[in-house]
Image (cartoon, rainbow, N blue to C red):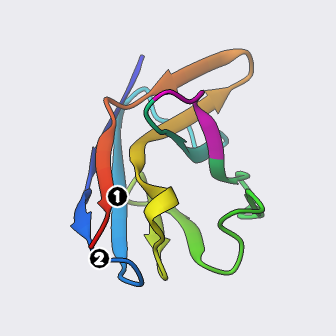
Amino acid sequence: QMQLVESGGGWVQPGGSLRLSCARSGSVWPYDILGWYRQAPGKQREPVATMSPSGVPTYADSVKGRFTISRDNTKNTVTLQMNSLKPEDTAVYYCHAQRFDNQFWGQGTQVTVSS
């Protein structure tokens, strides 16, 4: 089993920045696909950004140019740098890892963007 623990959420005004971090522990494998998902109130959980084991990122259209995902396999971490935040980015953000057909989730961290 692998454990994922997020940190870095909070409140920020529109236009501000936050950096989310996810620490992996337990059965860590460098070839896991890592990513971030979010779930806003009353909405389904949606992918925000993912990164392949080779470091190729993919982003949801809504965050392209504003968010950056990165991973450090030596430290077993994955981060999400979020800039130019908008109120519609408000959600619980979840760290995610996929290993073949297995999926692992963190507990989630709240991000609130409001004035």
Query: Is 77 above or below relative to 27?
Result: below
Kind of residue at badge 1: Ser
Residue 33 visible to an observer of this rendering: no
Q: Judge left or right: residue 97 versus residue 4.
A: right
Q: Judge left or right: residue 62 versus residue 13.
A: right
The residue that label 2 is drawn on is 13
Quadrant for the C terminus in the image = bottom left
| Segment tinted magenta in the rendering | 42-47
Of the numbered discs 1 and 2, the one sitting upstream in the chain is 2
Q: Judge left or right: residue 104 versus residue 49.
A: left
* Residue 38 is one of the magenta-drawn residues: no
* Residue 44 is one of the magenta-drawn residues: yes
- In which quarter of the view is residue 49 placed? bottom right
Residue 106 visible to an observer of this rendering: yes
Name the residue nearer the viewer: 20 or 11: 11
Q: Residue 37 appears at what percent x and percent y? A: 55, 42
Q: Residue 50 appears at what percent x and percent y? A: 67, 51
Q: Give how far apart the Cα atoms at labels 1 and 2 are.
A: 20 Å
Q: Secondary structure at mark 1?
A: strand
Front: mark 1 or 2? 2
> What residue is drawn where x is 35% and y is 82%?
16
Query: Is 85 above or below relative to 3?
Result: below
Q: Secondary structure at mark 2?
A: loop
Q: Residues within 10 Å of mark 1 (few under 14, many from 20)?
A: many
Q: Residue 48 appears at what percent x and percent y? A: 62, 51
> What residue is drawn where x is 46% and y is 35%?
28
Quadrant for the N terminus in the image = top left
- In which quarter of the view is residue 103 placed? top right
The residue that label 1 is drawn on is 21
> What residue is drawn where x is 47% and y is 39%?
40
